């Protein structure tokens, strides 16, 4: 079904990106890529992830199929490996993970027992900003100190993230010339910071992160991993402002 | 009221020195300096701190005034900044803290709601020792392993710190030639190690720490931060020996 | 009774090797060496340890004797020292530990109050493997993720460690050419992983670790510390397989 070799670092990145939202996931395997679309248990956020077979040292899939993986366990095992290569093999309802002189055999989950793959909504959002993942994480950490929701928006070609607590507030502003890209009309929307805090960890490693915003629409965050061979898209439901 | 720029490292040092004893403090601002005198909630220790306007990249105060600051919050925010400069601005009952592309606005506390500034007792203590902050911290950690009080004293031009537990004991001895300075007659007194453990963290960073001791008198510990532009003095009430 | 100087690193290694199994130990002192034989409170594992007087900077014992030492306390104190030398002196029912300008005095334990020294069984085990301590630790960590017992054995000149959980399993295999040494007939036996996890920490620092196995016999693990001047032997009772 699957026979692949992948660098341990790439495998760790891949797991982190998905396990931010779900503990168990179904991986769709084809000869060209591995893909996951999953929604978190509370139906607030979604991840769509694809990684090309080119990101692997070797990658063989005989026919399109689907496997269910316990990401917590996989992450725990892969965490023991150094920085070398890891071999992954599926057979007999099991995933065999090999590195150094060790072999793990991990029972696969029945894909039909996992939450159904959600439909990715097609969104046409009015504002699009590209900034560094690091800067995004900084703003998330800062605003999370004063509130549990953040306003993200554009005002006169300035991108801002702002949170207001009862006594204190925090605001990050990035004018157009400090952004990698800005295509936007004025807009703002409200998002939950607990999800953004979790997401911002894998996001922080990306040089270019594309953020798309629409008033009371889901937030769309796109970035790549594995030298552009893996594509990640997060969608996060807005909080509706009471004003 | 206040408009200043300060290096993040200096600001962190300054906060640590005061927050060792209190969570909230009133800062007295004048055009020449910023000063804090505070006593801990249990009235056992006191800190007197002054930092010259020269320690700042820029420092403007239009008229003498006082602000109340939540040090726990300030420390949490400043902890996010890297090693660059931080801008502080007071206005409208708020402290604005800016670094990178972030602005925090933190409500100030009403100075009159804070514990009254204590009177600094004038002490003329018979023994004075100058040693490195590191050595002081070492002795505090060592004696704290066997007791919760330490005897500090001078005997025949040897400075010692000693603690006796039920079964074990620990003693540090520094003869005159291992001290930076010693002006002393023989004397010893007893002090609580819990306070000294907290104080010894900021103290350990100072090259020269001046310790003054008098039998059953408060312990006086003086050192500088910020390239000598900030002066710290701790006073710590003695424990009275039962013998 | 004892007057010795020892490098702090060596002393820390020595304590770690013994304190893996017991909190308190009796040290037998002679002019040539220091030795400990101890069994853990549950009577499942044993340590036999000897360190030659050559491992010390200086070592004087006037007549053969025995001291009882609280290893937890000693480890805590020695942990404060840097990497320099530590002086140990026994007198008056106390152990005096000196480093830098500090002196600790620690009450010794009455050796007769400690658990009796066990008899070391003489074992002639059929299989003997020499591998690196690091590899051993890796296999222990890996198998401990899926079970609380591990099968260790030899099959066709391949050394393996294997654990089977309800769903998952882990196996390390080292063929003869990846081992430092292999003298063996085919054999396997079962051992508890909790003890092996603790033991594997000091073991991991050794380049060469000798493992001896016999079906349902105690496991014997031997290695050196302190540049071969200290010899450690662990014995670990097998778990009897129910099959």
Image: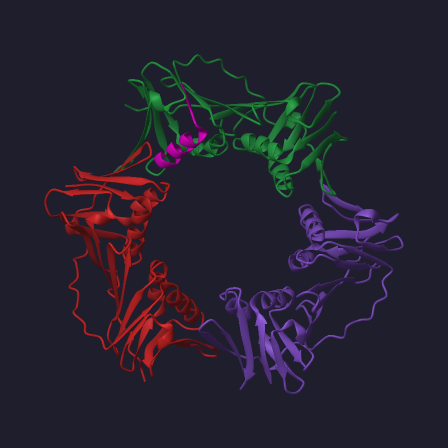
Chain colours: A green, B red, C purple
Position of A230 with respect to C29 (left or right) is left
Question: Going 64% across and 42% down the picture, which residue do you hit?
Answer: A82
In the displayed structure, would residue C221 be above or below residue B167? above
Q: Nearer the viewer, residue C58 or B217?
A: C58
| Direction from residue C112 to residue A137 in the image, left or right | left
In this image, C190 relative to B217: left or right?
A: right
Quarter of the image holding residue C242? bottom right
User: Does residue A148 sit above or below A230 in this rendering?
Assistant: below
Q: Position of residue C243 (x, y in %)?
A: 83, 51
Q: Residue at x 39, y 34 (%)?
A: A138
Nearer to us in this view, C99 or A228:
C99
Q: Residue furthest front?
A: B177
Q: Quadrant of the N terminus of chain C?
A: bottom right
Residue C19 at least partly seen: yes
Residue at the limit of the structure toward the left, as seen here? B63
Specify whether residue A134 is painted magenta: yes
Q: Residue at x 11, y 48 (%)?
A: B64
Q: Is residue B209 magenta?
A: no
| Magenta-colored segment: predominant secondary structure | helix
Q: Is residue B114 visible?
A: no
B207, A183: nearer the viewer = B207
| Residue C150 x/y as whole percent | 74, 52
Q: Quadrant of residue A101?
A: top right
Q: Nearer the viewer, residue C81 or A123?
A: C81
Point out residue A62 in the picture as x, y percentages from the top left corner.
75, 20
B111 in relation to C92, above or below:
above
Range of magenta residues:
A129-143
């Amino acid at each position: 079904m699957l026979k692949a070799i992948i660098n341990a670092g790439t495998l760790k990145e891949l797991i982190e990106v998905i396990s931010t939202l779900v503990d168990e996931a179904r991986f769709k395997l084809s000869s060209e890529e591995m893909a996951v679309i999953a929604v978190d248990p509370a139906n607030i956020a979604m991840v769509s992830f694809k990684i090309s077979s080119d990101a692997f040292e070797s990658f063989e899939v005989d026919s399109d199929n689907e496997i269910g993986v316990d990401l917590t366990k996989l992450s725990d095992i892969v965490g023991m490996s150094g920085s070398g290569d890891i071999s992954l093999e599926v057979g007999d309802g099991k995933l065999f993970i090999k590195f150094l002189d060790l072999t793990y055999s991990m029972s696969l989950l029945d894909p039909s027992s996992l939450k159904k793959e959600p439909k990715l909504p097609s969104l046409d959002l009015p504002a699009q900003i590209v900034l560094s993942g690091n800067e995004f994480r900084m703003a998330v950490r800062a605003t999370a100190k004063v509130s549990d929701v953040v306003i993200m928006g554009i005002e006169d070609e300035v991108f801002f993230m702002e949170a207001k607590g009862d006594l204190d507030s925090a605001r990050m502003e990035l004018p157009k010339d400090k952004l990698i890209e800005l295509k936007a009309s004025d807009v703002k929307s409200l998002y939950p910071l607990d999800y953004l805090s979790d997401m911002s960890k894998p996001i922080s490693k990306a040089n270019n992160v594309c953020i798309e915003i629409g008033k009371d629409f889901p937030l769309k965050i796109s970035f790549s991993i594995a030298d552009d061979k893996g594509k990640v898209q997060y969608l996060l439901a807005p909080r509706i402002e009471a004003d």
